[in-house]
Image (spheres, rainbow, N blue to C red):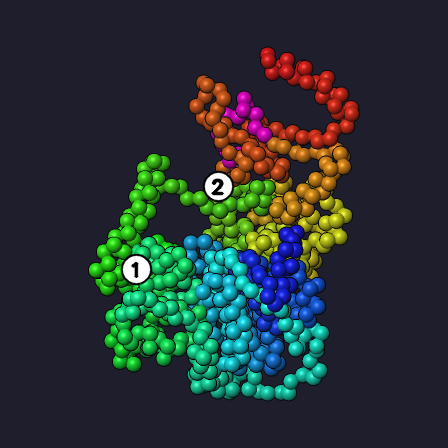
Amino acid sequence: MEVSFGEEIQSLQLGAGQTFHGEGILAITKGLLQSGVSYVGGYQGAPVSHLLDVMVQAKPYLDTLGVHVEACSNEASAAAMLGASIHYPVRGAVTWKSIVGTNVAADALSNLASPGVTGGVLIVVGEDYGEGASVIQERTHAYALKSGMLLLDPRPDLARMVHMVEHGFRLSEASNMPAIMELRIRACHVRGSFETKDNLAPAISTRQLIQEPAGFDYMRLAHPPVTFRHEKLKGEQRIPAARRYIAENGLNELFEGEHKDLGLIVQGGLYNTLIRSLQQFGLADAFGESKIPMLVLNVTSPLVPDQLERFCEDKRAVLMIEEGQPEYIEQELATLLRRAGIATPLHGKDLLPSAGEYTAEVMSQGLAGFVEKYLASDAAALGSARAWLQGNAQRRADVAKAVGGALPARPPGMCIGCPERPVFSALKLAQQDVGPVHIAGDIGCHALATFEPFSFGHSILGYGMSLASRAGVSPLMRRRVLSVMGDGGFWHNGLLTGVQSALFNGDDAVLLIFKNGYTSATGTQDIISTPDDEAKAAAPNKAQSLAHVNQTIESTLKGLGVQWMRTVHTYEVDTVRATLTEAFTTEFQGLKVIVAEGECQLERQRRIKPWIAGLLKKGQRVVRVKYGVDEDVCNGDHACIRLSGCPTLTLKDNPDPLKVDPVATVIDGCVGCGLCGANAHAATLCPSFYRAEVVQNPKWHERLLDAVRAPFVRLLQAA
């Protein structure tokens, strides 16, 4: 991984009385070390990937504390690490993106939650939900409820977040329940400061080893018949113990307000948004002081009945603000109030949307109904909020009118020079020969091919699951089905659920593996097939990919029994096209694997830019490839753009006043990958593309040749 977290690592070493400044997820990481965590693991993925990335790069410092760090192959293996805390009084923390990551880890989590834990366990999940999400719109709450785990949802304030990390471990130990801490995208990236404490070297660590294993205890196994006892323990001992700890340590926060006959109950992670929304009504100030009393649930499971009943019993009405569906908290709260004989009207999803992220605007629309019903006398408050909401709507309408309709969608796209784009160009061309094929997609950068100009992918069912997902389709399809996955997906799940199954069943399938050398979509973290540092240092100026250096994927496939395998370089569009066509049409029956090599362009640029800068600083000759379009030759067909989709290949006005069609052009930002030229050759497009070499610090004979040529070039241009 080429990205350096040097500054972040330094901030992890701050001691007692110093001040931390930075992002929420890094504050959480600091909180783990202040809590005496013994081991940390996880699987990378936004929005919490910084936690694991920083920990991996901070291994030399963590070794001094005796903290073990493990970069896990998937979320299931990360969750399984927590088994260390079942028998031993060691604190462990793992992290991943939820809800997809929690789905993968669900089996291990269930088997962990059944016997319970001795040492504190904290699972930090990025609750990837809402407008900025990249996954399915589900919540972690259901897992906490079904498996009997604690669920923390801290108020997005760095001091409070770190406080909840420290208490999360203690709460886990007091109740013997694993704790999940969910962090929304905005909480991960909220910035602030807090006063730090010294990091604690754990009592049991890589420097203070366990001398003897724990004795055998059948009650510590998630295995019948003791699982029936575990289920009773959850309700009889663990949840009551958790509730006592939550109440005694004030983990949920009560904020008083002047309208004492009303109340707001809110998930901790939504607190900042709620304050912003209340400000539109004049019901909160810039310092977070609310005029309506609030109960902030920094622990959303289990709920504390006594606390909720006391808050609601003397109120004219209470609004429960809970994001997502089903409304687990609202339903449980309604049951608690009913059983306690409290008749306070409870509002929630009747005023707020059942699904979707609660932004300040969405929340204000729900609050407007609550304020209108119970604070009708405060017309000014309601009027200012209505004006704000109407102003937002009017601005959108004005913009739509100005552009002649709704703004066009701006879906994400592959990076400039992405090695995966040329493969999809080749696939477009191959289907012209063999006909349309069913394409099983996968999680990763290649999932961006579902957008135009490719629009490829009939299904995405999980990371590394593409080959497995076509098992029901391919036997019923006249043409062979194509499955696409990256090297990250291959190691995460694809090898076992896809390749092994296809070989075992003798399936006639086609698998395309993008071998770009990293788990690129999650932040270009290293994997087992990443070229090592020695290979990168030995060839910093490699024009082509370094992906071929590490043959772990190919060796694994051969060892497993794959007989038909081809390796292609992604930028050679014509070769990739021919290889795909061969895979679709060959008489060979069985699994056919195409390994498409092409180093992630982000990592390649991070690797070669410092090398080029060093050469220029020394005054050495550097050649940079630049592609362009001859405006006089371009006929305005734009087939090149439809085949490529590269952001640097775009349109501009035709310089010829007699032609109205815009011409193609290559703008600044081109990294010289050569895709446009390769497409023009493979698809037999117009010969308008040219390849130029920009020479910096040229040799003396090149300067002389240029001086001779320049007058003739200017003469020809004038003519």
- Please give left or right for residue 185 compared with residue 53 in the image: left
Question: Can residue 53 be seen in the rendering of this structure?
Answer: yes
- Please give left or right for residue 185 compared with residue 681 in the image: left
**Residue type beneath disc 1:** Leu
Mark 2, residues whose alpha carbon is within 10 Å: few (<14), some, or many (≥20)?
some
Return the x and y of residue 561 as percentages of the image width and height: 66, 61
Q: Is the magenta stretch mostly helix, strand or loop?
A: loop
Residue at (29% x, 81% y) in the render: 340
Q: Could you say which is closer to the camera, residue 334 or residue 139?
A: 334
Magenta region includes residue 631: yes
Quadrant assignment, res 31: bottom right
**Residue type beneath disc 2:** Pro
Residue at mark 2 to residue at mark 1: CA–CA distance: 42 Å
Return the x and y of residue 606 as percentages of the image width and height: 65, 46
**Image quarter hosting the N terminus:** bottom right
Counting residues from the N terminus, which is met first, the one under dot 2 or under dot 1? 1
Return the x and y of residue 345 as percentages of the image width and height: 25, 71
Magenta region includes residue 503: no
Q: Name the residue under label 2.
A: 453
Residue at (63% x, 55% y) in the render: 7
Quadrant assignment, res 246: bottom left
Is there a contact, CB below 8 Å, between mark 2 and mark 1?
no
Task: Tell me the SS state at disc 1.
Answer: helix
Magenta segment boundaries in residue numbering: 628-641
Front disc: 2 or 1: 1
Question: Can residue 503 be seen in the rendering of this structure?
Answer: no
Residue at (64% x, 63% y) in the render: 13
Return the x and y of residue 40 as percentages of the image width and height: 61, 68
Q: Mark 1 points at which residue?
A: 367
Residue at (27% x, 62% y) in the render: 370
